[in-house]
Image: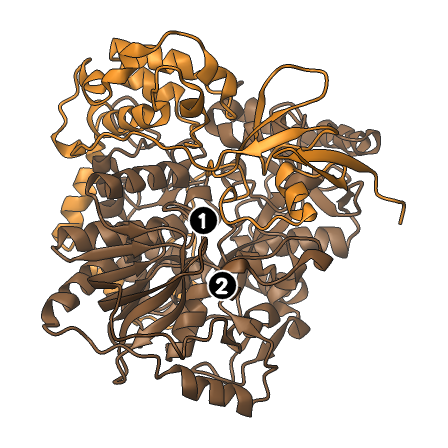
Amino acid sequence: MYPEYMLESIKRLKATRKERMEQKFPMRTPKQKEELLKGFHPDYIASSMRTLKVGPNKGDKTPHELANLLEAYPVLDLSKLDLSRPDRDVDVLIIGGGGAGASAALVAHKAGANVLVVTKLRIGDANTRMAQGGIQAADKQNDSPVRHYLDVMGGGHFKNVPELVRALVLDAPGVVAWLEELGVMFDKEPDGTMITIHGGGTSRKRMHAARDYTGAEIMRVLQDELLNRDIPRVEFAGATELLTDGNGGVSGAVLVNLETGEKLVVRAKTTILATGGCGRLHIQGFPCTNHYGATADGLVLAYRAGAKLAFMDTIQYHPTGVAYPEQIVGLLVTEKVRSIGAHLVNLQGNRFIYELESRDITASAIIRECKERNNGVQTPTGRFGVWLDTPLIEILKGAGTVKKSLPAMHHQFERFGIIMDKEPILTYPTQHYQNGGILINDRAETGLRNLYAAGEVAGGIHGRNRLMGNSLLGILVFGRRAGNTAAKAAKAIKQKPKIGLGHIEPFVAELKKAKIPEGRKSPMLLPDYRRPEMRRPYAFLTQ
Amino acid sequence: MPKQEMVTIYVMGKAYKVPKDLTIMDAMEYAGYQFIRGCGCRGGFCGACGTIYRTRDSYKLKVGLACQTVIEDGMYLTQLPFFPANKATYNIRKIRPTTQTLVKFYPEIMRCISCNACTKICPQDIDVMSYINAAIKGDNEAVADMSFDCIMCGLCASRCPAEIVHYNVALLARRITGSKIHKRSSHLKERLKEIRERKFDKDIERLMKSSEQELSKMYYDKKIRDIEPR
C-alpha cells in the first residue's frame, strides 16, 4: 500500500500512459553512454576504490569493501593443523553448491571422477536460485551465436576475453538442450518452440525463461540430479583456505564446519572454485539482490594462493531493485518486467531512458534522474526511486500476463499490499553482480595449476558489464567445462598430491610489509546483520 | 530522530523487544541471532526460512518466510529450517511416464486423507492438496503446473499426517513434464547440428580478431546488428 503522497505521482504516471505508448524512445549513442557512465555510474566514483598493495593484482583498483578482504589475514590460524592425515581424498573437490558447482559435479562425476561437493550452506543455496529473468542462447532461426557474440562484447564495452565469449555463445544452445533433457520446464509453445524475449542489450529475443523462477527451476533440477546420482557432498562447511603442493599447484582445501567448528582437510588432485559473488559486501553501502552467502570467499582464497583476478574494478548494479516497501529494499525486480513492456517513469510521469539499454547505462540513467534532476519519488524512509509501470504490461500483453509471467514478483509485492498488475512499483539500482573475478581461460583453468573456477567467481567472460541472461548461462557453460577439464586433469595425476599451507606465510609477510592492519581477517563466510553492539565473531571461528 | 516504536516477539518462547515493521529475519538479527540455518537467499526463493507462528487472540497456526513476513506484536514463532524428507532415486532419462509413475516412486501419496493441512501451511499459497490429488490421478502435467511456485521449504511435509513429501513428488512431476511431456524444441536441435558442423566458427573467429574499434563499428551499425522489435 502506498502512502497518500505517492499516489499523486502515480496519477501523473497513469495520465501519461497513452502518450508514452506511442512514444519512440531512442537508444543512447556511444558518446551519450560514456557521459552517463562517467557522470553517474557508481564504479566511476574514484573515492570508492583503492589500489591494491599486496598480491597478484598489486597496483590494480578495486572497491574498498573487497580490498579489505583481499588484503587481509587468514580468519583461522591453521598453522597447528595436522595435515598428515587428510579427512578426505578425492579427484575433484568442488567448493560451492550453486549452479556452477552442481553442473561441474554432474559432468565430472559422469567422466568417472571421484567428486566431492562442499558448500557453506545448503546445496542449492546460491544466487543461481534467485535468478528470475532467464538464460540466453541463440537457438532461433533469426539469431546466431555470432550475433550473440557481438551483443556480449558490446554489453561488456568490448573488453571481454574473446575465447571466453566464444565458449559462452557456442555452448549456449547445448546447455539449454542439456537442461531440457534433465527436465527443466522452459516456457514453450505447444509445438515445443521456446518462448523467448529480449533482455537489455540483446539484438534478438533469445532469453529463455521458466516463468520468473528460471534460476530456481534450474537449481532444483540440478540439485535433484546430484541426489539421484548420490554424488558425495558436505553442507555447512566453509572453505577458509586452499591447500597447495609447494610447487605452484593447488591440492585441496581446509573447511570449517559452521555448526561445530570442526576442521575438515580435503586433499584433491584438482579443485574447482564455484563460490559465487560478493553482493553481501554491500559495496558503497548499496543494498543487494544476492544470497546470504555471497561474500567473495573464492576470490580471497584464490588471491592468497596467487591467482590473478580480472575486472575487479567493476560491479554490476541492477537498474531495478525494490525501493519500496522498506522491508524488501534492494531485492531484485527482474529485467523481464521491462522486457515484456513496462516503462521506467519518473516523478513527473515521464520516460527518461530506453528500458532495454544495457544494465550499467539504465542504472546510471536512474541515478541521474534521482540525484541530478530531482525527478525521483521519495519514500517515507528517505530513499528515492523511479516507477516501473507494470500495469502497462497488462495493456500491452493482455490481462493476466503479470500473474502468469511474473508469479514470484507478483506474490512478493502482494505480501506488502501492492498489486503490481494494478499499481506501478518503485525501483532503484541495487548491487547485483560481480562483473569480474578469477581470470580463467576457456577450459576454466585459473592461473594456478589444478585450480579451476566457474560461475560468478570467474572473471573475463562479461568484460565490464554483463548482459541479462548471461549469468545463468555462464554458470552452466563454465561449470560444465570446469567439471570436464578437472576430471580429465585428475585422471592424469597418478599420485596423491602434496598438501600444505606454504603459500600463507609469504602472503602474510607481504601484508605486514604493506602495514595492513592485523585485525583485518578473511574470508568472511557469512555477513553479520546483528545490531552493532551485538556483533562478535561467529562461534565456528572461535571454537 | 523520532523514537523507534518497539514491539515484543517471542522467539521459541523467549521475549525480545524489537523495532516494529521489521521482517521476522531482520527482527531476529536485531535481537542478536546469527543465522547459519534458517536463512538463505533472503529474497523468498530458497525455502530456508520457513517460520510457523501464532498471534495473540487466535488459535490459528500461521506461516510465512522469515525474510518476507513482517512481525506483529505478540508474535510467537519458531523456524523450521529443515525437515527430514523421503526422496525417491530415479534416472530421469529412463522414465517412460504413465499415470502410475508418481505413485510408483511415491506410493505414500495414496495415503492422503484430504485434510488440506499442506495447502493451509504453504507460504507460497500453492494448492498443495489439489496437486497431490492430481498426482494420485497420474496427471503429471497438472502437478507440474500447480506446483511451479514451490520453493521446497518443507512445511507441507511437516504437517502431513500421511507422511507425504509433497515437494519431492512435485519435483519429479515437473522433471517428467519438462523432459517427456512438453515437446522438445526443433529449432534447438537444428542449431545444435549447425554448431556441430562448425557453421559459425569462421565468423566468430573473425570477430575475435577484430579490434575494439572494429567491433564497436559493427555493434552500432544497424545493418549488421539490427534490433528485433520488442
Report the disc number at residue B20. Answer: none
Residue indicated by mark 2: A543
Percent across and percent down for residue A177 are 22, 40
Q: What amino acid type should be assigned to the residue bearing mark 1?
A: Asn
Report the disc number at residue A127. Answer: 1
In which quadrant of the rendered view does residue A245 lie? bottom left
- Whether residues under marks 2 and 1 lie with C-beta atoms below 8 angstroms apart, the answer is no
Number of residues whose C-alpha sits closer than 10 Å to that of mark 2, classed few (under 14), some (14–19) or many (20 or more): few
Percent across and percent down for residue A503 are 37, 83
Number of residues whose C-alpha sits closer than 10 Å to that of mark 1, classed few (under 14), some (14–19) or many (20 or more): many
Instruction: Single out the residue that lies furthest toward the bottom.
Output: A513
Q: Nearer the viewer, residue A214 or B68?
A: B68
The residue under the point 50% across, 27% down is A407
Assign the N terminus of chain A to one quadrant of the image: top right
Chain B's colour? orange
Q: What amino acid type should be assigned to the residue bearing mark 2?
A: Gln
Question: Which colouring convention does the figure follow?
Answer: by chain
Chain that the image shows in brown:
A
Instruction: Provide the chain ID for the residue under circle 2.
Output: A
Percent across and percent down for residue A121 are 43, 50
